[in-house]
């Protein structure tokens, strides 16, 4: 009998943080313009000590102004999607649940696009207007998961196959509406592939990074307070209740927080698929299915996965870029099929 | 004795009711309908019985007689339409899920796992209600879980995967998880359903020993006439949502009554132990 201890949890997380660091360095180094490790180290130290003005070379500017923000964005997007996926899998008792597969990402995309359409017509401060997109994405995500939850029920119980079908169909329906909106509207809206496939290339204001970071930690923290409840929910809501879980409260907290995380990620990167499916499975395989370990390791693992996928997206056909969502889908979709087949047999 | 309305206001104030009994089911009824405008699909008529610490009560009846509904009412997961259920003076339905899980353990017909878990992880889940929401299991929790496994004779299963052990072994691990909750009341819904005869007897022997040693009050839902006769101190006989009789097996097991409830010809004999034995007869060839 070896119950989880704080020490073991911290050890597991620090191993992943070291891997994350290595992946970040690799991602900074590789790209259309090669950068030496020495120059990389020197420029990063300048940033750390708040002396960005001393960065001289153009290479340094590429690192600090282009690659680093993009990597930060990838970290937040990956961690958010991965924690959201882990949460949906536990709540819906479906190992194949993921924000993208369930159509929640499409719902968030649609919400964000509607917010972008509405924003210019409202007389509000620019700061609030900037928050309108993530808010729209969150509402879109929350509405979609609610709809899919009820569509996925049969005779009062969640049926896992019906749920997945309902998610896939809802996602394709919402994508069709996005296509419709995108082809009828022209102007300042970002391109089609951004919302349909997911990209990390859009530059963002510095304040948005703060909002993303704080938003992630608040929502992921809220989910983490229910970590041991989620362990019991895997056995079913009734059984969890008999073991002392306040099921309606946990369900509410986790659905809202996971929708928020999906909205957060989608509002800045579009629909990056399958991260919330692959990463929790890999982490569960390595560290077991205890959510007290799974949630933090999936968060770090999600960051690692998206940074790696984005580095591939930037370099594989350089100087042209592939959307990062295309890379995650190419890897994720076959894995989804594999997991589905294994479960059916 | 406090009035019923006072109890409803403050479930944490124990009412001095039911004498020395631990569990007191008082005129409890329930109705289930698909939606509020329709006539109920199922009703449970007023049912009452009491149970002391160390006692085993069997809720006995054919399918759809309301056994599981009564169990869910006792567990506090359903609210009764009328009447009340007291556990040591507390209304079970009014307790928070956490407090309820510290006092009542429920063993379901089956426990499905989504992801693989080892037996010890499963048993430690029983400690959930005794800790804060975000903590790691203490030394005490581990000792209690180990003891629980030992008490059901499953200490050697501790490191096995739950999906790799037999049905009987699994049922014992599930029982161990219920014991790890350190409850006052142990509720079991058809615990012997998927077990072979040896595993059934093993489980029920363990239950009887545990009820005596740990002073649990045990309520078992079953349709197994002979197992109920052999192990129960009290039988609550149910038919189509009505509680027909409550009493020790020897007084309940009357041929006409059981034939009428179970809709099949049978004979009842008194065993040497003073417990009745039922033999179900086939209509054509006599004994089945």
Image (spheres, coloured by chain):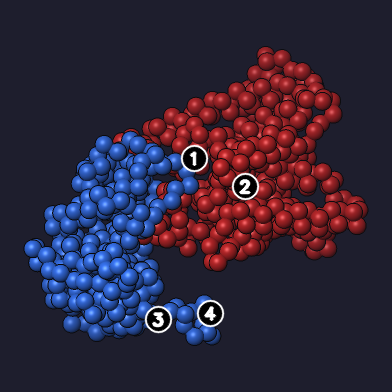
Chain colours: A red, B blue
Q: Secondary structure at mark 4?
A: loop
Residue ID for mark 4 = B35
Percent x, y for residue B163?
41, 42
Residue B43, label in figure: 3
The Cα atoms of the two marked residues, 1 and 4, are separated by 40 Å
Where is residue A59 shown, x and y percent of the image? Answer: 77, 21
Disc 2 sits on a residue from what chain? A
Do discs 3 and 2 share a chain?
A: no
Q: Secondary structure at mark 2?
A: loop
> Which residue is painted at 33% across and 55% down in the image?
B129
- Report which residue position mark 1 lands on: A294
Horizontally, is B25 left or right of B79 in the view? left
Dot placed on the residue nearer the N-terminal end, 4 or 3: 4
Report in which chain the residue with disc 1 lies.
A
* Marks 3/1: CA–CA distance: 44 Å
Q: Between tags 4 and 3, which lies in front?
A: 3
Residue at (15, 76) in percent of width and height: B251
In percent of the image, x 67 and y 48: which residue is there? A101
Image quadrant of residue B84?
A: bottom left
Measure the alpha-carbon separation of dots 4 and 3.
Answer: 14 Å
Tag 3 subunit:
B
**Eye-nearest disc, 2 or 4:** 4
For the residues labelled 2 and 4, the Cα–Cα distance comes to 33 Å
């Amino acid at each position: 009998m070896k119950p989880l201890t704080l020490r073991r949890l911290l050890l597991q997380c620090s191993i992943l943080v070291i891997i994350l660091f290595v992946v970040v360095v690799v991602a900074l180094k590789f790209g259309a313009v090669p950068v030496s490790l020495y120059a990389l180290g020197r420029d990063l130290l300048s940033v750390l000590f708040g002396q960005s003005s001393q960065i001289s070379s153009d290479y340094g500017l590429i690192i600090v102004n282009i690659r680093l923000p993009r990597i930060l964005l990838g970290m937040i997007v990956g961690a958010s999607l991965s924690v959201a996926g882990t949460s949906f899998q536990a709540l819906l008792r479906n190992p194949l649940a993921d924000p993208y597969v369930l159509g929640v990402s499409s719902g968030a995309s649609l919400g964000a696009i509607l917010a972008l359409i509405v924003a210019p017509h409202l007389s509000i401060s620019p700061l609030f207007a900037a928050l309108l997109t993530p808010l729209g994405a969150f509402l879109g995500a929350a509405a979609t998961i609610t709809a899919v939850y009820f569509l996925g029920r049969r005779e009062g119980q969640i049926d896992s196959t019906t749920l997945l079908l309902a998610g896939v169909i809802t996602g394709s329906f919402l994508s069709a509406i996005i296509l419709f909106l995108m082809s009828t509207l022209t102007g300042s809206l970002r391109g089609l592939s951004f919302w349909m496939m997911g990209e990390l290339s859009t530059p963002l204001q510095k304040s948005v990074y703060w909002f993303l970071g704080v938003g992630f930690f608040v929502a992921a923290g809220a989910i983490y307070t229910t970590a041991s409840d989620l362990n019991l929910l895997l056995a079913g809501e009734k059984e969890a209740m008999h073991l002392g879980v306040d099921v309606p409260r946990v369900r509410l907290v986790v659905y809202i927080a996971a929708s928020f995380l999906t909205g957060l990620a989608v509002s800045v990167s579009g629909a990056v698929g399958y991260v919330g499916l692959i990463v929790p499975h890999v982490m569960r395989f390595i560290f077991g299915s205890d959510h007290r370990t799974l949630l933090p390791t999936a968060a770090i693992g999600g960051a690692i996965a998206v940074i790696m996928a984005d580095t591939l997206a930037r370099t594989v056909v350089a100087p042209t870029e592939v959307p990062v969502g295309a890379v995650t889908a190419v890897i994720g979709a076959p894995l989804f099929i594999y997991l589905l087949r294994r479960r059916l047999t | 004795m406090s009035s019923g309305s006072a109890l409803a206001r403050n479930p944490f104030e124990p009412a001095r009711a039911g004498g020395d009994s631990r569990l007191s089911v008082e005129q409890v009824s329930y109705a289930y309908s698909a939606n509020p405008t329709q006539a109920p699909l199922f009703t449970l008529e007023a049912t009452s019985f009491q149970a002391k610490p160390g006692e085993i009560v069997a809720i006995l009846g054919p399918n759809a007689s309301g056994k599981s509904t009564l169990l869910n009412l006792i567990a506090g997961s359903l609210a009764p339409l009328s009447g009340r259920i007291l556990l040591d003076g507390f209304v079970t339905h009014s307790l928070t899920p956490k407090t309820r899980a510290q006092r009542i353990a429920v063993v379901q017909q089956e426990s499905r796992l989504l992801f693989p878990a080892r037996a010890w992880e499963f048993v430690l889940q029983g400690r959930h209600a005794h800790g804060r929401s975000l903590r790691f299991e203490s030394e005490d929790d581990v000792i209690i879980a180990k003891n629980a496994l030992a008490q059901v004779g499953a200490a050697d299963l501790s490191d096995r995967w739950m999906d790799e052990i037999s049905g009987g072994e699994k049922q014992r691990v599930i029982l161990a998880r219920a014991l790890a909750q350190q409850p006052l009341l142990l509720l079991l819904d058809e615990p012997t359903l998927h077990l072979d005869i040896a595993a059934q007897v093993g489980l029920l022997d363990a239950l009887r020993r545990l009820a005596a040693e740990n002073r649990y009050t045990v309520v078992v839902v079953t349709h197994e006439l002979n197992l109920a006769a052999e192990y129960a101190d009290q039988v609550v006989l149910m038919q189509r949502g009505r509680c027909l009789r409550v009493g020790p097996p020897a007084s309940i097991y009357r041929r006409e009554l059981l034939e009428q409830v179970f809709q099949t010809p049978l004979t009842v004999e008194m065993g040497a132990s003073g417990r009745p034995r039922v033999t179900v007869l086939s209509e054509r060839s006599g004994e089945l």
